[in-house]
Structure formats: C-alpha cells, structure tokens
Image (cartoon, rainbow, N blue to C red):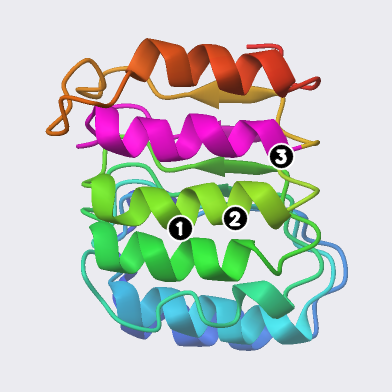
Amino acid sequence: MDLDDSNIGDDGLKSIFENLKSNSTLQSLCLSGNKITGNGTSLIFESLLSNSTLKKLNLDYNYIGTSISTFKYLSSNNSLTTLSLQKNYINDNTATELFEEIKLNSTLTVLDLGYNKLGDYCAKSIGKALKSNVTLTVLNIKNNKLSGDGAIEIFESLKFNSSLKVLNISRNNIGKSRDVHNNVPQSIFNGLQYNNTLTA
C-alpha cells in the first residue's frame, strides 16, 4: 500500500496502525513524505508488535531526527525484512539506538539509512551490530557524515560478519582521518580479506 506524500503526520498514524493490528494480509507499506516524527515512528514499531505480516516499511523523507527511544521495539519485531529511512535527519544518537536494536533483530535483511547525519560516533554501534547480526544482507549508509575513523570501525567488523552482501558507504568523507595512524585503505583490505559474503 502506497501512502506517500499524504500529509498523514503522527496523529494520522494512530488509526492506520490500530487497524493494522488485526490485518493479516498487508505486506508492504510506504509512508514516505508524511511529516512523521520520532514519536510517530515509535508508535509504528510498537503497533507492529501485534502484526506479523508486514515485511516492507518505507519511511523516507520524514522527520525522525534526534528523537529518543524511536526504535526500541524493533528488536522484538519478527516480520519486517526491509526498512527504508532515507532523508530523515537521523543523527548519531538516534542511529546508535537503532543499531543496538539491530543487534537483536532476527528478520531484517535490508536497511537503508542513506542521506542522513550518521557520523563517527555511531560507527562503533554499526560495527558491533554487524558483528552479531546474522540476517542483514544489505546496508546503505550512503551520503552521511562518516570520516575514515568511522569507516575503519565498520570495515574491521566485516571480518566477523557472515551475512552482509551489499554495503553502500559512498559519498562519505572516508578518505580523511583525524588520527594520522589510521590507515583506511588497509582496513578496507583487511575487512574484505577475511569476509566471505560481501559481493558489492
């Protein structure tokens, strides 16, 4: 079901997801461009605890931003396989919370966080999630605020990851590092050398 650019907002979500609790057929829902905040997003994931059929959720072009506890129910979700969160002004703190949930989630295979504000602070959480999560196959963190220091955390984690097939980290500033001792190309090589699943 496609409801993009429908001016739904947080208030409109309540009735939609109240009805979804009893729905047993809907598998894909697009809510991009609907002025949804972090509070609305939290409501979505709480409501999905009672829904076991929705597999694809698109929340691109909303206003999740810096909200706290936005994704606290994601680790308990056992149906979503694809989650798209492009252009949501998501910063390090919110992304760190998200990846803490990803560590414990057992169904999500595709996560799109392109065009947000992820920086080096959350890179450690991304790395930890990639070390422990065994289902995520596609991760897009294109066009964020990662430097070489953050990229090293991510590429080093690939040595221990056995599921990721596609990693898009383009349009970040990974060629620059605040630590002169960091060798980004070497870390990329190390991650790829010991990883047997990444294809793109």
* Quadrant assignment, res 86: top left
Q: Is residue 152 magenta?
A: yes
Q: Nearer the viewer, residue 139 or 134?
A: 134
Q: Which residue is mark 3?
A: 160
Q: Which residue is mark 2?
A: 129
Q: How many other residues sit within 10 Å of disc 2, few (<14), some (14-19) or many (≥20)?
A: many
Label 3 vs label 1: CA separation?
14 Å
Name the residue located 19 percent from the left edge and 37 percent from the top edge: 145
Q: What percent of the width, then of the height, locates residue 185?
A: 39, 11
* Quadrant assignment, res 143: top left
Q: Are marks 1 and 2 in contact (CB under 8 Å)?
A: yes
Q: Secondary structure at mark 1?
A: helix
Q: Quadrant of the C terminus?
A: top right
Q: Are marks 2 and 3 in contact (CB under 8 Å)?
A: no
Residue 31 seen:
no
Q: Is residue 27 left or right of residue 187?
A: right
